Amino acid sequence: MSYLEYAVKSTPSGFRKFLYMNWPLTLLLISAASAGFLMLYSVAGGSWMPWAEPQMERFGLGLAVMFIVALVPIWFWRNMSVLAYIISILLLVYVELFGTVGMGAQRWIDLKFMRLQPSELMKVTLVMLLAAYYDWLPSHKTSKPLWVTIPVLLILIPTFMVLRQPDLGTSILLLAAGGGLMFLAGVHWAYFAAVIAAGIGLVSAVFNSRGTDWQLLKDYQFRRIDTFLDPSTDPLGAGYHITQSKIALGSGGWNGRGFMQGTQSRLNFLPEKHTDFIFTTLAEEFGFVGGITLLLLYGLILVFCMVTALSTKDRFSSLVTLGIALNFFLFFAVNMSMVMGLAPVVGVPLPMVSYGGSAMLVLMAAFGIVQSAHIHRPR
Amino acid sequence: MKPRKPKSQGLAYKRLPRRALVLGGLQAAFIGGLAARMRFMQVEQADQYRLLAEENRINIRLIPPKRGQIYDRNGQIIGQNSPSYRIVVVPEDAGDLDKVIGKLSELIPLNGDEIERARTEIRRSAPFLPVTLADQVTWEDISKVAVNAPALPGVTPEVGLTRQYPRYEDFAHVVGYVGPVSDYDLSQIEDPEPVLRIPRFQIGKVGLEAKQETSLRGKAGAKRVEVNATGRVMRELDRREGQAGSDLQLSVDADLQQYAQARLEGESAAAVVIDCETGDIRAISSAPSFDPNLFVRGISVADYRALTQDKYRPLANKTVQGTYPPGSTFKMITAMAALEAGVIGPSNTVYCPGHLKVGSRRFHCWKRGGHGTVDLQLSLKRSCDVYYYDVALRTGIDKISDMARIFGLGVKHDIPMSAVAAGLAPNQEWKQRVHGQDWLVGDTANASIGQGFMLASPLQLAVMTARIATGRAVSPRLVRSVNGIEQPSGAGEPLDVNPYNLEQVRKAMFTVSNDRRGTAYRSRIIADDFRMAGKTGTSQVRNITKAERAAGVIRNADLPWERRDHALFVSFAPYDNPKYAVAVVVEHGGGGSTAAAPVARDIMLQALYDGTPPLEAYPVADRERIKEQQKKLEGDRRPKARPDEKDRA
């Protein structure tokens, strides 16, 4: 039986597709988003405006996008991968030239109804392209230097473009997601060992470059690293965010200060409390129990993505699902590490919970692809 | 769409689940790490972080305590807290600040400096903190602002408490005044209370207000408020009321004080009235005086300059701060020292030829021709100087100095007023120590008549007189009760002197103002129950040169004011049962009998009758003049509230 025949026969069609969706994943996403609405309601001082309501509308839109993407067969998305990647690169070029400047970086394209961050889109399209690449590449070539160089370049091009915006956080995420995908695809261990060694070399180079003409990072990026390493050196300046965030989180205790009772967020001690630091508010108001619950929710989302990835025999489906799951993991892992003082403040939102349109939409579209892989998996 | 073969074969595909599991395992481990970190922060370190969060949000705000009020002995108010109105603006509510200030200046007069200061304050402080635009605003202006409130967004009238002294000049030197805490004040205090850092908080600067600061101030209360990150108060959590300052009741009688102040007007003078039984200071006035309310508000440069450049020195408190050679009023001490030393007896006599040769120098009696044969009584009555030169030289300065100290001269009395002077009762040791010179017999002669090094304040003279009158170590008491709790009386123990000797001195003092030939006979009291004993004094502020003496001593009236003699008078009455002791010093007033004694007599009568005395108490010849004077002083007494003050209330 040819693949097409096999696939067409074994995949559901029409409205039956809904029945074959990865419903646990859908429900988990809705739960995580709902936790977000609740927190946005809370940080607005018990009001649906200005954050919770727009966020719900966007999530509705995101769900619709997810369903639409899910209903389209996965092989269509595989075939679209190259195009999607090229479009993302072009958008990155566009923001480089015409983008809206915000928060000291050039990141957005203003689409009137929302602001699109091409770097967000890039995270997904990079994963798609790499998955498609390894789907296409005969497996015995996977670890050949030439065939390793190509995906490395595919990763590095957008990484450097994002770094130029400058957005250190996203570029690191791109690098990590791309590298992770190559690892999943079965590239030889030795390459990773080499890259890690080179990475350590680069980090020391970066630190040594400080204050010289060839300084590799912006001053504010160095300062963020400084305050990360020792927030107490500047408790009212740059270290303020980390210090206040840790206070909020720690003061939550076992079961929290109670819904809308978090003093740190309610009294504005917490910076960016509706976006990057929303987890702190949650941890402050619902305590360890609340924080662990959200972490568990995220863990389950990863588990169900893994289920999809391992239950399909299609290589693209597996890779793209695992890549998206990895992206999702990196999102919340970096964000949580940051608010807990384990990582420097890099400006990565908490997926599904932080207020913000384009990240949410892109993420929902990505989960649409996961759903599509699940529905259209060859059985 | 191109069909394709599922790539289900090969090593790479087999590797996928394995690598997926490795990556999944790494992710799980990281999630576990996050959970552990969260547990560490939220469970193990929760208390520590909770404390930090509380420190963030909770602010302690002080509630300034109500300052204790000051009353006179009869409960008349002397220092009170009265409402003061000010106009404040909250910048964030005002919107266009310039427009609002412009509108406000059309309604009420605004001080340009104050507006400038307000603008600087607005630039520096948070926009929700009120800033004062005008202080000490009249009620009328407040009403104008209140009526126009809709046109003045963010502008509100505010009421606060400020110190007010309804007795104006009368108590300026006693009570002093308060003022806002200055940086200098803070630097003077070790570990200042936080309440002192409240803007515009008033503390005592001078006088009783400063000396009794701790009991008048009270204890600040505190409220705990929740603030947000920018410091805005969100709500009050709880409050602990402070403790109002203690009310002080003075021993001073405000009416008598007012009389004394009015009686001294026009002179640079001081008068002290002491209750002989308790040491209570019934009146303690220094003239000229000033309005302490000016200082509370912040005195203008012009007003201040006028006060400092006045040659009568209105700012100096002459009652305790000013020291004068006591002159002949010191003779009682010399007499007591001689009597106690057994050098003379009351009836022993000294011949006064008008001068006494001490060493190579001639010491003159004030009476050129001399007094002839003089005993104790006559020596005081006629104020013979030679008698005292003689007995003093026989007694020795150290004994005189000790006697002065027994009667409270040269001793700093413990009274809560500013710059209380110790005066000076010199002895040999003192001169050696301070001047590095030997004590000379001439110094003794000078000291014997209260000249030379000898210095005493009017308060000390009053205390001395009270001690002579009672034979007890009367000590002055200014504060009668604190919060209704009576303070220890100043009645004192019997003095360590022979009561008989003291009796002789008193008798002699009686003749001063009751014997026809006494120096203060003209200022006697003729009411039988209230006979007064006293002693005049005229202390030189210049040396009379030989040439001057030869040319005939120049009359005081012909000298410039600064070089005229000080006039002094000390007295007590009634003679047989002393009630009050009065000391009066008129700076550069001329003779004690003419410049000081009448003043002391009038104040004494006012005290004895507790109000305007009947004319029958005065010598017949004086009654017409006294009647005029009483009428004038009645008229002089100021109304309780001045017209310009009334519209502030």
Image (spheres, grey):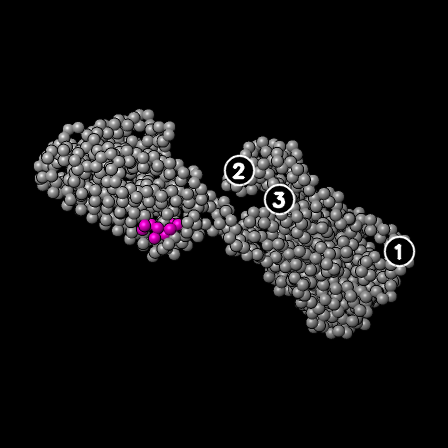
Q: Is residue B238 above or below residue A97?
A: below
The location of residue A169, given as percent across then percent down, is 29, 38
Q: Main secondary structure of the magenta part?
A: helix
Looking at the image, tell me whether mark 3 or mark 2 is earlier in sequence order: 2
- Provide the residue span drawn in magenta: A284-293
Snapshot quadrant of residue B110: top right
Q: Amino acid at mark 3?
A: Glu
The location of residue B623, given as percent across then percent down, is 89, 55
- Say yes or no: labels 3 and 1 on the same chain: yes
Looking at the image, tell me whether mark 3 or mark 1 is earlier in sequence order: 3
Residue picked out by circle 2: B92
Badge 3 density bin: few <14, some 14–19, many ≥20, Cα 10 Å: some
Q: What chain letter is assigned to the residue under label 1?
A: B
Q: Amino acid at mark 2?
A: Glu
The location of residue B183, given as percent across then percent down, is 55, 48
Query: Going 67% across and 45% down the picture, which residue do you hit?
Result: B294
Q: Are marks 3 and 2 in contact (CB under 8 Å)?
A: no
- Say yes or no: labels 1 and 2 on the same chain: yes
Q: Nearer the viewer, mark 3 or mark 1?
A: 3
Assign the C terminus of chain A to one quadrant of the image.
top left
The location of residue B557, given as percent across then percent down, is 80, 48
Residue picked out by circle 1: B622
| Residue A289 part of the magenta segment | yes
Asked whether residue B199 is in view, the answer is yes
Q: Nearer the viewer, residue B447 or A362?
A: A362
Q: Nearer the viewer, residue B590 or B249?
A: B249
Side of B233 where A350 appears, left or right? left
What label does residue B158 carry, if any? 3
